[in-house]
Image (cartoon, rainbow, N blue to C red):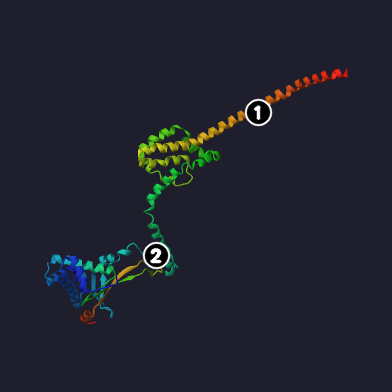
Amino acid sequence: MNNKIPLKKFAEAFSKESNLPEAEAEAFIRQLFDIVASELKAGFKVRINGIGTFSLSASAGEPVVFVPDDIFAQEINAPFSIFQPVPLAEGVTEEDLARVEVPELSQPQAEEEPQPEPLPELREEPVVQEIESAPASIPEVQETPETDTAPEAEPVKPVESGDEFEVEQPVKQDEAPEVTTKPEPATPADTTVTEIVETPAPEEAAQPPAAVPEWEYEEEEYVQQPAETKSRFGAGFVIGLIVGLAIGALVLCAYIMYYVNATPQDNSVETELIESHISPVLE
Amino acid sequence: MEYKELVSRLSMNSGLPAENISGKIEAVAKVLRNFCKELDVVAVPGFGTFQPVKEDEIIVTGEDGTKTLLPPAIEVSFKSSVILRKALGK
């Protein structure tokens, strides 16, 4: 860069390009430009394909005007071919452009580098995170149907039906290509129960069939727990209420039996005893 | 001087067949473009120097007042040698 290339080096490069000996290459270059010089002396302009046109100038400064050929100009400006002339708005100065160019040049460099690498990671990470965090997210699913009934009851309904587990298993094994397109919506944090059930599908297609029962078993645990807890809670509440009422009834009955009915008998016995002891004394 | 005349005359001076001259001229042009692409100055003794100059982007104002931002570019200027200037009488 910015080196001065003498004729010897020029001829050396030309000889490699044309498979000529260096001496012949140097002689050829000299003859070529000697002809151009002689034509210029005669007052003609000379055009060399791939280089440009040489002509005489009327000005006193440079006697020869060189106009590069289109191919010549395009090839040496190939690094700048991505740029195009841009019309600017009024009031825009070079200082304004200098301020804007710094962040514009820094942003694409930062964006281009990490793009190829994280793409495969993003496809794999969300699936692993969801599978690992599936048991941890169970309480979230338990809370959602209690608080909001209308919007979240729709995704929960298909999961609660126990028949769907048996239906989903053949679908996941047979329809592997459909499952690979689905991991894109897995990123949002507010995943409903249906989304969580879909996420293990891509790994099922990738993993050996031996791992399939494990995922299904986890899904069953995950899905059945809310239904069991609801039924257990209701049944326990009812049983506790019945047991409490029964205990209360028993306590009430015992109270009535021992205190209400027994006191008059005891009093009658006591009065009889007292009267039996007192009456002889009084007499 | 047309290109065909240049080829025929060069063929006569070098002794090479005219069919090969176009390929040789194209090779010379390719080597010259490669050097200029690297911003190297190519000197041809007795003729002149090809000097590539990189110009940064500039704002050009048109006749109607509109401003246009031109991208950077490499321009090649030719500076004739002293021998050529003397031969041309300048």
Judge whether A38 appears above or below A131 on screen: below
Give the left or right position of residue A242, taking residue B4 as reference. right
Q: Where does the image place residue A119, in percent across and percent down from the top left?
A: 38, 51
Q: Where does the image place residue A44, in percent across and percent down from the top left?
A: 20, 75
Q: Which quadrant of the view contains residue A85? A: bottom left
Q: Are marks 1 and 2 on the same chain?
A: yes
Q: Which quadrant of the view contains residue B3? A: bottom left
Tag shown at residue A87? 2
Mark yes or no: residue A9 visible.
yes
Query: Does dot 2 land on a helix, a strand or a loop?
Result: strand
Q: Which quadrant of the view contains residue A96? A: bottom left
A192 or B58, which lies in front?
A192
Query: Does dot 1 land on a helix, a strand or a loop?
Result: helix
Judge whether A46 appears above or below A217 on screen: below
Quadrant assignment for the N terminus of chain A: bottom left
Q: Earlier in the sequence, mark 1 or mark 2?
A: 2
Label 1 vs label 2, nearer the camera:
1
Circle 1 is placed at which residue position?
A: A248
Give the left or right position of residue A152, taking residue B35 as reference. right
A123 or B24, which lies in front?
A123
Q: Where does the image place residue A260, in percent across and percent down from the top left?
A: 73, 24
Judge whether A194 appears above or below A101 on screen: above
Q: Disc 1 marks which amino acid? A: Gly
Q: Disc 2 marks which amino acid? A: Pro
Give the left or right position of residue A224, taking residue A47 as reference. right
Tag shown at residue A268? none
Label 2: few (<14), some (14–19) or many (≥20) C-alpha neighbours in 10 Å: some
Rendered residue at 51%/34% (across/down): A228
Question: Do the residues bearing badges 1 and 2 touch, measured as CB atoms within 8 Å?
Answer: no
